[in-house]
Image (cartoon, rainbow, N blue to C red):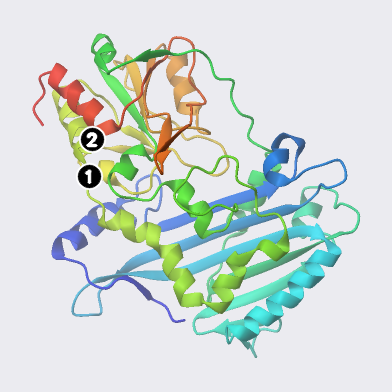
Amino acid sequence: MFLPYPVIDSLTPEQVSMWDAHFSPEAGGQRRPAIEEGIWRRTQDPANREQSGWTEDESGRRRVVHYRLHYGLDRTQPMERLVLEELYLYVSWLAPAAEVAVHRKELDKWLAEGRWKPASDEPGTWRRGDLRATVTEHTTHPQDERADRDTPDGFTSVDVTIHSVDYTLTRAARNLPWDVLAGGMRVKEQRGTPTYSDDLSGLLDYLPFVVEAGCGTSIEAGIPPLHWLHEVYRVTARTGNDLTQGYKFTLVPADDILVKEVLTDTTRKVNDMTSMFRSLVLAEPTNAHRVLKALHDAGAMTGPVATHNFDRLFAKAGLEEAFMRRYDQRTPYMPFPDDAKALLVIGLHADRRAVQARARERGLKVFYLDTEGVTENGVHKSYLIEGAREGDVVVRSEAIPALQHLAELLKVNI
């Protein structure tokens, strides 16, 4: 496989202008929007026994996945195209030594099937076009030594790193998934007893409001939900666009088909890995984004949008974004305007609650706009907002109709 790898073969002049405005290095603001990054660390623990298979006699397994994909525009062709410029994928296993030994043999077989060749200039490295692959075994993983963390008796580690040629990460970037691991499991918040309302009319008494957005508005724009990446990177044994709750973690090396796919069917798998970014570049703001822009212009909404999305849809709609998503579990500063009286949380569920906590500390009323469930194959599955508290208001609705109704109540033209 060779880089740059085409993700969108040709872009229109309007899409090129959009890229330059919202995804180029100059447009990033708090982050680099042309870099897609993801981290998953899965361990066995009594608190996740159903997903991890933890028992008194079966514990200590670990799987860490870290990926970084760098995108850019290739302007050397008659039509500009979106390309993948750099690729980095790291998978680390801690498991019983016998399982790691079997997995190691499988890795050799997959390298051969995928036509990877030993790199003459780098012992222990294989090459395939512009990609390089390394496999490293550890009796005690260096990151466990760094953290002074014990290795279970009879366990060993194996790391697989696949990256574009000459691509390097800073030490801080390499350590990031392990620093996240050291933070321990996320402790679920204790849900309170919020008030339910049929619409957002209660917001009229708390103007202006600030918005915090999860992936709900992005899904309405045709972008796959973030948990869809769990299937791409084989984090759980799930298939299809369903919620991730309740699915078993991938915690046995023999079940790790992610590395097999990358090594044996590289082009197809890279196409899977880049599909999320392709969809968000092509996505356009929906009426939800446009309504919020109109409400902001009318003074009913204030400040930047606290967003956990990397699709730049709010920026495309003309709204300032404050990007909140980080993997070290430290939420960036959120600039709440002094005149803000409420926080409207749209389509954000489980694990990012700092913005809401800070809003409550400032005396802001918290409203949630969320369906609190999904319907799949005609069956509704409940998915309650985790962080709702006493005094909060929940409106069970999709974003577009609820926001359009709010605009009508405020007599704001879209």
Residue 272, by quadrant, is bottom left
361 or 129: which is nearer to us?
Answer: 129
Q: Residues within 10 Å of mark 2 (few under 14, many from 20)?
A: many
Question: In the rendering, at what x and y percent does residue 318 appear?
Answer: 20, 40
Q: Residues within 10 Å of mark 1 (few under 14, many from 20)?
A: many
Query: Does 101 sit above or below residue 373?
Result: below
Identify residue type, mark 1: Pro
Q: Mark 1 = which residue?
A: 285
Asked if marks 1 and 2 touch (Cβ < 8 Å), the reply is yes
Q: Mark 2 = which residue?
A: 288
In this image, 278 relative to 360: left or right?
Answer: left
Secondary structure beneath dot 1 equals loop
285 or 79: which is nearer to us?
Answer: 285
Q: Residue at x 49, y 15 (%)?
A: 389
Secondary structure beneath dot 2 equals helix
Question: Going by the picture, which residue comes out furthest to the bottom?
Answer: 120
Query: Does 44 sit above or below residue 202?
Result: below
Query: Quick check: can you spot residue 138?
Result: no
Quadrant (top left/top right/bottom left/bottom right) for the C terminus = top left
Question: In the rendering, at what x and y percent does residue 134 appear?
Answer: 66, 75
Question: In the rendering, at what x and y percent does residue 255 appear?
Answer: 67, 62
Identify residue type, mark 2: Ala
Q: Which disc, if any, is residue 22?
A: none
Residue 371, by quadrant, is top left
334 or 266: which is nearer to us?
Answer: 266
In this image, 58 relative to 301: left or right?
Answer: right
Question: In the rendering, at what x and y percent does residue 184 appear?
Answer: 69, 38
Query: Quick check: can you spot residue 103?
Result: yes
